[in-house]
Image: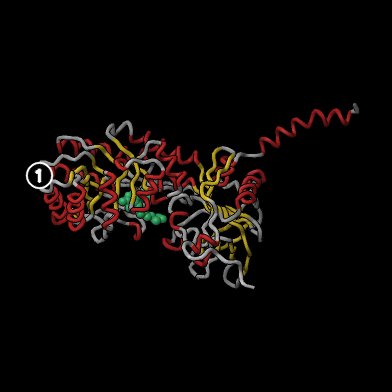
Amino acid sequence: MSLRRLSLALLLPVMALQAQQAAPTLHEALLAARADRAGEPGVAAAFKRLADAHGTPLYIYDQAHIKGQVASLRAAFGPRFPKLRIFYALKANTNPAVIDLLRAEGLGAEVVSGGEIESALRQGYAGRDIMFTSSSKNPREIRRAIELGTVLNVDSLDELNQVQAEARRQKKQARISFRINPGVDPHTIHQINTGIAESKFGLHLQGGIAFKAYETAKGMPEVRIEGAHCHIGSQITETDGYVLTARKMLGFVKELKDKLGIRLAFLDLGGGLGIPYQDGQHLMSPEDLAKDLEPVWKEGVAAAGYEPTLWLEPGRFFVGGSGYLLVRVNTVKETPIKTFVNVDAGFNTLMRPAMYQAYHRVRIIGRTQDPVKVDIAGDVCETGDILAEGRLLPRAKAGDLAVILDAGAYGFSMASEYNARPLPAEVMVVGNEAKVVRRRGTMNDLYRSAKPAAAPRK
Ligand code: LLP
């Protein structure tokens, strides 16, 4: 063997090892993109693999992230609240694989529609493990919920009367709680504030309305009062709103027992736990929240003389950070005012920026040089279809990939087929594998019961 050959033979395994080290798994590539390392070649190769295999726009979910979030909530609340039950608010992400995962993790299902009830059932939930909250339930939904033995979270006296009538018809006792409007402002985006007095949700503590509801229900043999519920908003970043809410709700728990002799099996403080959407953003952790709630809870249950089970029902917290929306750059356009990076997804794919001016981080894949200030613009024919505004990002070219972070909650679940664009595909990443958990929509999906999409006319 020549010297050259010998040194090559010795070097090859070392080079292979280096290549191996340089090639992150899909899961690692997702984390690297979060850490602003999407420009690295190995990371770029992983995203390219995903785009080649599944096309764009593509929703990618990181299973490890979801499991980690469940574990962190449990670790914070479990030791402090021995009587605890955690639900998953399905509306954040109704992908069957996501629901399946969270059911397997032992969470209950919080649903807001007949459709979400069926989604939970399909993934193996029993009716008794479902909590049904909606301020506007139709008669079919009420009927189904009572049949299944789900907890109906009643939102008005009118609804209570309808539930009573339906339970009588079914000769069953309906399990109920009431959604309470505690009149607390959690300081979040206005459109997702739900517990303030002018919101459409719940029965107000104010004016004794909630009290009256319990008093009325107590006289109805057709209903079994199991709890009280509230949910003050979404993407909440500070603990103070929760603390105030817990204090008010526990005061109400005491009032119900003292004046009506009602003991609740549970008190549900809702979901709403925020997640960081920006680099370096600091916000309350589950640990902060559990720590701040603990003394108020202890004081409240001591005063009430008994302890209901604490229920929580976050959605975003579990799935938001797990989601990545992978898009491709169609064109780059410089105008006298701005530079637009036009991508192949829009507010039909991810509604949050257009609807709430929500901020989502964007990473250009495989590029690190020549930063320019750009707007990431969608492909929907509306001026408001901007996914990210005024971002300093490495210069992108047509055909490049970009990834939008924290798209796991209220991303696909709020997507539409506007502009006749079929819905994107969704994949779940486990380690180095990506499994399709919902296929890409097709033109036929847009036609549904009408005739299937015909071949285009010549
Ligand atoms: N429980 C109830 C009664 C709710 O209404 C909601 C969300 C949740 C739980 C879960 O909230 P979370 O933990 O995910 O914050 N589309 C908006 C968020 C709307 C939230 C609606 N209700 C967004 O994209 O920010």
Please name the residue shown 59% across and 63% down the image.
341
Left or right relative to 339: residue 256: left
View extreme (top): residue: 1
> Residue at the location (56% across, 40% down)?
27
**Lateral position of residue 218 relative to residue 320, left or right:** left
State whether residue 456 is above or below residue 297. below
Mark 1 residue's CB less than 8 Å from ligand 1: no
For mark 1, what is the residue? 260
Residue 289, by quadrant, is: top left
Q: Residue 248, how many percent across, how many down?
A: 20, 47
Which residue of the protein is positioned furthest toward the left in this rendering? 259
> Which quadrant of the rendered structure holds the N terminus?
top right
| Horizontal side, residue 405 vs residue 152: left or right | right
Q: Quadrant of the C terminus?
A: bottom right
Residue 385 appears at what percent x and percent y?
A: 50, 66
Q: Position of residue 84 (x, y in %)?
A: 29, 36
Q: Is residue 183 above or below residue 286?
A: below
Q: Nearer the viewer, residue 287 or 457?
A: 457
- Residue 419 against residue 133 in the figure, above or below: below
Q: Would residue 165 be seen by someone viewing this image from the given angle?
A: yes
Residue 236, visible in the rendered structure: no
Q: What residue is at 10 percent from the left and 48 percent from the top?
A: 219
**Amino acid at dot 1:** Leu
Residue at far front of view? 451
The type of colouring in the image is secondary structure
Question: How many C-alpha atoms fall within 10 Å of the one at disc 1: few (<14), some, or many (≥20)?
Answer: few
How many numbered markers are drawn? 1
Identify the element where label 1 is drawn. helix
Q: Residue at x 27, y 39 (%)?
A: 310
Residue 164 or 301: which is nearer the viewer?
Answer: 164
Q: Quadrant of residue 429?
A: top right
